[in-house]
């Protein structure tokens, strides 16, 4: 069972906590993490790219010159791909890039990502993120105290002050316990979790 330090927003260690092996002590499956990241990026794609093929470009119904005797290469249409203004060969058409992973694969990938962060000592637990007011400086001071720059901060539900205080900080993203995903966990250098959010994660994903 992994044991990590618990810090306060001043960056001082105030205790330790045992992490659930069911969530933070699994065997890291790099293939599933890769598939989860590919799926998330694929599902974001609009898939609206479109270009016209030779059958869709206007004009070109008439043969530009006769087949033989002109000295030119034979041509059947001025809208063939080799002509300026012609259609595109194998033109892209609107499509859906999304695909599905089953629930077990998604959960295993998320647990693998969280475990990898714990193993790399890039997982920080904060006892409480209580900010009396919405102020970016207060949140930035917490990050400075923890010596963290690029971070994913997982906050318990209802902590609006912390979410709004962090929204203007570059390279910092806040997430709820129900919106964490493999891509964000791997993208940011450090994962910071409040103690309350950690309890929810262990309860939901164990």
Image (tube, helix red, strand yellow):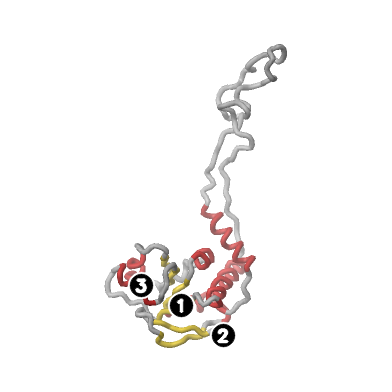
Instruction: Determine if residue 107 is in view.
Output: yes
Alpha-carbon neighbours of circle 1 within 10 Å: few (<14), some, or many (≥20)?
A: many
Is residue 39 positioned above or below 23 on the image? above
Quarter of the image where the C terminus is located: bottom right
Residue in the image at 44% along x and 67% along y? 150
In the image, 68 versus 49, the foreground residue is 68
Alpha carbon distance from label 2 to label 1: 16 Å
Q: Name the residue under label 3.
A: 159
Among the 4 quarters of the image, the one containing residue 93: top right
Residue 200 picture location, percent across and down: 47, 77
Badge 1 is on which residue? 124
- Above or below residue 130? Residue 93 is above
Give the mark nearest the N terminus, 2 or 1.
Answer: 2
Q: Which of 17 and 141 is in front in this view?
A: 141
Residue reaching furthest top?
Answer: 69
Residue at 58% across / 67% down in the picture? Answer: 106
Q: In whole angstroms, how far apart are the C-alphas of marks 3 and 1?
A: 18 Å
Looking at the rendering, in which quadrant would you find the N terminus?
bottom right
Q: Which of 38 and 144 is in front in this view?
A: 144
């Amino acid at each position: 069972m992994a044991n990590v330090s618990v810090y306060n927003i001043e960056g001082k260690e105030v205790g330790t906590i045992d992490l659930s092996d069911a969530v933070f002590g699994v065997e890291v499956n790099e293939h599933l993490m890769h598939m989860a990241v590919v799926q998330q990026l694929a599902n974001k794609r609009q898939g609206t790219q479109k270009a016209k093929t030779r059958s869709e470009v206007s004009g070109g119904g008439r043969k530009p010159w006769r087949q033989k005797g002109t000295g030119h290469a034979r041509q059947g249409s001025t809208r063939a791909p080799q002509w300026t203004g012609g259609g595109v060969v194998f033109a892209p058409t609107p499509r859906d890039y999304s695909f599905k992973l089953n629930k077990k694969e998604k959960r295993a990938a998320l647990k693998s990502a969280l475990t990898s962060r714990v193993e790399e000592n890039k997982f920080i637990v904060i006892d409480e993120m209580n900010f009396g007011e919405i102020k970016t400086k207060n949140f930035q001071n917490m990050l400075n105290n923890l010596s963290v720059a690029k971070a994913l901060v997982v906050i318990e539900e209802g902590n609006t002050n912390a979410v709004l205080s962090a929204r203007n900080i570059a390279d910092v993203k806040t997430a709820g316990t129900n919106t964490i995903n493999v891509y964000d966990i791997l993208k940011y250098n450090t994962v910071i979790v409040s103690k309350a959010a950690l309890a929810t994660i262990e309860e939901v994903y164990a």
